Amino acid sequence: MKQWLSAVVGLSFLASSSLNGIAQSPAPQPAYLSETPITAPHAMVVTIDHYATDAGVEVLKEGGNAVDAAVAVGFALAVVYPNAGNIGGGGFMLIRPASRKLAGGKPRFLDYREKAPAAATRDMYLDAKGNIIPHKSTRGEAASGVPGTVAGLTFAEKHYGRLGLAKVMAPAIRYAREGFVLDPEVAQLLHSSQMTPYADSRRIFQRDGDFYKPGETFKQPELASTLERIAADPDDFYRGKMAQQIADFEKANGGLITAQDLASYQCKERTPLVGHYHGLEVLTSPPPSSGGIVLLEILNILGGYDLPKLGPDRSPAQIHYITEAFRRAYMDRSDYLGDPDFNPHMPLKQMANPAYAAAWRTTIDPIKPSPSATLVRPAGFMPPAPDLAPIAHESNETTHFSVVDADGNAVSSTYTLNFYFGSGVTIGPLGFLLNDEMDDFTSKVGVPNGFGLIQGPANAIAPGKRPLSSMTPTIVSEPDHHFLFFKRPGQLRLVLGTPGGSTIITTVANDLISVVDNGLNIQQAADAPRFHHQYLPDILQFDKFFDPTTVAALKATGYKTMQQSEFDEKAPGVWGDSELIAVDPHKAPAKSTAC
């Protein structure tokens, strides 16, 4: 199948933004609008790390499909990007087949999010006075949920891959056994104080204080052996000797994960959410991801506006309407969402109802912001919401990868350890870091977690429960074509995703809007400066390099604004990175710069 793809993995960089609608002044064309994406005629793998990308490309060249390549990438990132890539964490994988040859032609969503151990309790991170104990849910063994990554990746390979674990895991095993050359970014990240208190982490990743330098080869023999054992028998991680090693380590160090917790863990297949935006089908993530339904609610609200008529991309008028959609959708997120296995009656249909979006639009002032404290839901659509105090945001330390193979099958996958390097704890004999995903639960209803998103009782800690997430793997396509008794999947258009904690949803929304509404190519969309609002705290956030005149224009209308690390020269001041793929079936093939 000949198709034409373009791809990016992009960070926000210095760019200006023209003003329109709310205020107007002359401005040069933003720098990001001069960017062009990488293109290729057949297939594409996009990740945050070139070794992981190479692993996916290697597997595609060996005859693998998009799922094979995604599994190869997932295991490779566990080696070469240890701050977020993992086998000790969890995540989501969205699969869109191009035909019945894969998964019977039916889209699949794999939920391999971590689960709370059986010994977990609702108030386990509170002291005797009912106050949150600082860092207890983010550092050390007691911060970890039961890892799901190995279950998810091996399930995907077994059911939807072609090549088998031995082949798709070979690149990761090679990187761990033979080592890989550290780039400056990863070498610096290995200095993280999150790992320093823990002996095995300090020994493996920090060389007991003799920190690795850029250009050195980093080898991980314990992890290589672990990966070889998984490739030979993935069940060993959950029900074999490896599971017992994990349980023994946890017991000896005050953790909660037991052999029974591991044995009872399952990757779950859930039904993806489907919405529509300007004639395109949006396939996205169901709970325990909050990202998909919040994204669909945002798009439903914005679908009633002609955004380009308001002004160009990142103009104050566009930002105003987009922000107000963010505010309203995040309000619903905070009150209603959690693990569907524990909360089967979440009002997803109501949140995705176009009539509800239309009712929300009537509450949006064309000029002024709607203060979050005064926001009232339109009557007649949603069940009563609990009365909660606000909290703040969720981990940025996640990673995403997107894959399209030569047949047009697409995978969008996001997984995480939560904080950089998770809990900081490494199971020494096995060489991998444990997550600190328990912090994504509601430690105390109405009180901020480590990153500040509003958390309600639907996301309270309970044994065997999966915490709510903002991870939003998404795939956009043309609608399916129906012919009598069969259908043909519509043309794939976009594969989207990003890390960024609570900003994931808004970043995916902005990438999609920039491409679909504003006509940007995906490199321009990825490089455009980012903005975010999550209902509470009632702050419109901008990345460090956002045009200050645009920020000032929005502040003048009544928004409370904040620019990330605006005055810190050393801080990146941005969040997330967009790993995007676009398909253009109408463009003639040209020289490829990627697989």
Image (cartoon, rainbow, N blue to C red):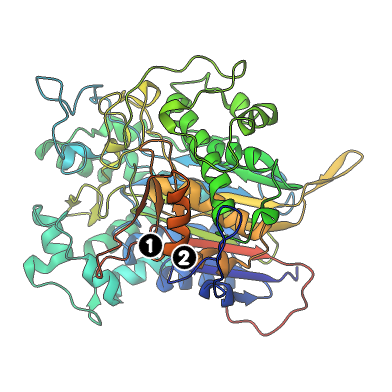
* Residue found at x 7% / y 66%: 208
Going by the numbered disc 2, the residue's amino acid type is: Thr
Judge from the rendering whether residue 68 lies leftward or rightward of residue 461; answer left or right. Answer: right
User: At 60% from the left edge and 63% from the top edge, which residue is drawn?
Assistant: 581
Q: Residue 258: where, in percent of width, then height?
A: 23, 33
Q: Where is residue 236 in the image (x, y as percent from the top left)?
A: 33, 45
* Residue 297, quarter of picture: top right
| Residue where numbered disc 1 is placed | 77
Q: How far apart are marks 1 and 2 (CA)?
A: 9 Å
Instruction: Name the foreground residue: 425 vs 347.
Output: 347
Q: Which of marks 1 and 2 is nearer the N terminus?
A: 2
Q: Where is residue 511 in the image (x, y as percent from the top left)?
A: 56, 57
Label 1 is placed on what type of residue? Leu
Near mark 2 (Cα within 10 A), the count class, few <14, some 14-19 or many ≥20, is many
**Residue 234 visible (yes or no):** no
Q: Quadrant of residue 166?
A: bottom left
Residue 47: mark? 2
